[in-house]
Amino acid sequence: MKENMVNAWNKRPLIISGPCSAETEEQVLATAQRLAATGKVDMLRAGIWKPRTKPGLFEGIGVKGLPWLMQAKKLTGLPTTVEVATAKHVEDALQFDVDVLWIGARTTVNPFSVQEVADALRGVDIPVLVKNPVHPDLDLWTGAIERLQKVGVKDIGMIHRGFSSYGNTEYRNAPMWHLPIEMKRRFPGMLLICDPSHICGNRHMLQAVMQQSIDLDFDGLIVESHIDPDNAWSDAKQQVTPEKLNEILDALVWRSGTSNTQEFITALATLREQINHIDDELLTLIGQRMKLADQIGEYKRNNNITILQTNRWNEILDRASAKGERLGLGKEFIGRYLDAIHLESIRHQNKIMNEE
Ligand code: PEP
Ligand code: MN
């Protein structure tokens, strides 16, 4: 990557901010200057080409906005990043000296597009951030990263922007934190940052989501900011002013991945040892439970009774929800846990009924 980028790319936490879309030269320059004034932002983002779900919305200012970003960089020293979805976007962005490219969620889902972008990057030494695909498919996310690696892109980072689901939920895109955690396992050491703006879809949840990503050891944030959020041409509800961003960043508690103090290390090792024991016991008990289910399966087979007994299943759910609540376990967790156990019991009994 270019020399001016090395420090910014390696900064932790890496903080990227800027408008959802570049709208006017004044807006881009003012946002950049007010962000730079916080002293907390490492890179300026702005959408130049906007992938809108429906036609007729603002689809981005286009190439015309790229000189504004160059000017913003000149004024503030902030490196710039834009979203690219086609070979032409890559060519234009490179021509105007954009420092980092990002691939958007609607592009990561499409291997043809990702390959087109990757091919345009063959032999180009520029960092690329890859957003997760819109739906929870880790192989598509992984595949996009692999396509970039295959053409020789050396500096790749991941952006977690949540996953869409049908209907209204609390989030615009549900975070499903276990998915970025799994990506961290797949790509150890690869930069992973959180995009709270597109997860939340509103301003009031931003801080909580940012804090959660910090607690999960993310490497940084990409947050949308605007000088006049309510009148933004895209994603108005989720943008904050640079000053508000500064306030939120101040309120966050930054944690580190490890501690070297002996007390911490010993305490953690002891607690983890206990967790290992309990996990072993849980598995042993679940194994015993399945043996009982096997025996019931044999009775059902011998008496030609269906596997699923809805009344009994409801009884199990009610008992466990009540007990789980007393133990401080979430209702949703109890439901998922019992579902998994129940499915495994059914698999066992199916085998007994049909394979023997
Ligand atoms: C964006 O960053 O403005 C954007 C379009 O995000 P996403 O690809 O995550 O929807
Ligand atoms: Mn946006």
Image (cartoon, helix red, strand yellow):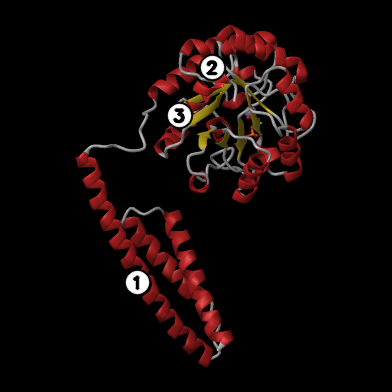
Asked whether the viewer can see residue 355, the reply is: yes
The residue depicted at 76 percent of the width and 25 percent of the height is: 91
Residue at numbered disc 2: 241
Neighbours of disc 2 within 10 Å: few (<14), some (14-19), many (20+): many
Badge 1 amino acid: Leu
* Residue that label 3 marks: 207
Residue lying at 75% horizontally and 19% vertically, measured from the top left: 61
Badge 1 is on which residue?
A: 285
The answer to which image quadrant residue 225 occupies is top right
Q: Secondary structure at mark 2?
A: loop
Q: In terms of depth relative to the viewer, which is nearer, 73 or 172?
A: 73
Q: Quadrant of residue 207?
A: top left
Please, what secondary structure does the residue beneath circle 1 have?
helix
Cα distance between the residues tagged 1 and 2: 54 Å
Cβ atoms at labels 3 and 1 below 8 Å apart: no
Three-letter code for the amino acid on which mark 3 is drawn: Gln
Please identify the quadrant where the N terminus is shown: top right
Q: Earlier in the sequence, mark 3 or mark 2?
A: 3
Question: x and y percent of residue 271 in the render?
Answer: 25, 52
Task: Let me know if residue 166 appears in the view.
Answer: no
